[in-house]
Amino acid sequence: GNESTMETAKKVSIIGSGNWACAIAKIVGNNCQRLPDFKDEVRMWTFQEKVNGRNLTDIINTEHENVKYMPGIKLPKNVVADPDVESAARGADVLIFVLPHQFLGKLGSKIKQVMAPGAIAISLIKAVHFDEKGIVLISDMIRESLGGTDVSVLMGANLAKEVAQGAFCETTIGYQREENGRLLQKVFNDPLFHVNIVPDVPGVEVCGALKNVVALGAGFSDGMGLGDNSKAAIIRIGLMEMKKFIQQHYPGVMDATFFESCGVADLIVTCYGGRNRRCAEAFARAGGKRSFESIEKELLNGQKLQGTLTIKEVFKILSRDGTLAQYPLFRSVHAIAFEGQPVESMLATLGCFRLQDAPKMLKQFGELEAKRTIVYYGRAGDKRAAL
């Protein structure tokens, strides 16, 4: 920002302060300082908690580091942590929502009263909400809670730690109004964080949620000790199921969106890095002896696992629509995570073995492999193994 254009310079506020919020605050803070379009100060709403007896906001504002959620990463000095959401959002022209969607709740009505007239918002929340009618986009929830504000979304292959460390990556903004897409591109784009904008909010947004389900499948594959070929197959099948699901529910979504960072790139990075894959691998290694809840507690330092929440809801929608048969991977991930199916059943579901093929499999792959891929489904008592 700079002082001469103060009248028209826009105020940017960040709602959230976890690891992804801090990674993005670094980029946004620097851009707001650098560009005349924006006011220098960026307020960051921070859920107040004590860390070693001190308020987290005090630590951030003196040491310019979120020692709990993004240790070792310095934030620009113009990013100011604020424990009061109304104070953080007061007069904001651009609101960046980057917090677990479970916490959105009553924030909207508070923010609506204090934000600037004509404010716009953008959601960086990689999740979707579900109600009895089906999918509810988080961007729509934010829009409604703010009284009809225009809401864009930002999703991409962006593991927070790497973004914070300044490793090159790309991201995608989905917009409804082009002028808002262009303004938001300025807020986020920098030489190492390359922003592409597309006129497709639901496509960009739902990719960000569904890829976490595919990452569970990739983690199961890793936990079984399978190799890169298997994981590539799961990623490809997963991408096709994501595309089918999204276009069945949002027929306007463009094929091209799946080739943006929010689609194929985010899917790849999540299936190789990221918390959903890591927890699913641990789940598979435990051989059904541990729940996802206990693994989440042990591995995630208070963060939430999105993939398991999402597959539960997706499964309900597919059951209700009568389309489960079209989604072997989604169905299998649900069966393994919540119906006590052995993790090996995923291979049978995707490969569609039949039990009567057992002797042939024995010849081809030898005792052990055949056991691993077939014997289990015998238990399920299903002719079409695990389908």
Image (cartoon, rainbow, N blue to C red):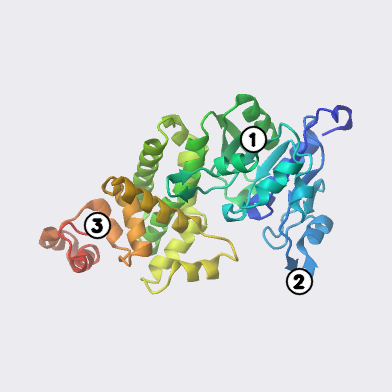
Q: What is the count of numbered marks?
A: 3
Q: Element type at marker 3? A: helix
Q: Element type at marker 2? A: loop
Tell us which disc is closer to us: 2 or 1: 1
Look at 35% across and 41% down and name the residue there.
240
The three-letter amino acid code for the residue at tag 1 is Thr
Q: Which image quarter holds the N terminus?
A: top right
Viewer-side residue, 162 vs 184: 184
Q: How far apart are labels 1 and 3 at the CA level?
A: 47 Å
Q: Which residue is mark 3?
A: 348
From the top left corner, tell me how far across and down residue 223 is, in percent: 39, 64
Quarter of the image where one finds residue 179 = top right
Q: Point out which mark residue 199 bears.
A: none
Q: Which residue is mark 2?
A: 52
Q: Element type at marker 1? A: loop
Q: Point out which mark residue 149 bears.
A: 1
Viewer-side residue, 225 vs 61: 61
From the top left corner, tell me how far across and down residue 67 is, in percent: 72, 62
The three-letter amino acid code for the residue at tag 2 is Asn
Disc 2 or 1, which lies upstream in sequence?
Answer: 2
Q: How far apart are labels 3 and 2 at the CA level?
A: 50 Å
Determine the residue located farthest toward the bottom in the rendered image.
289
Q: Is residue 156 left or right of residue 146?
A: left
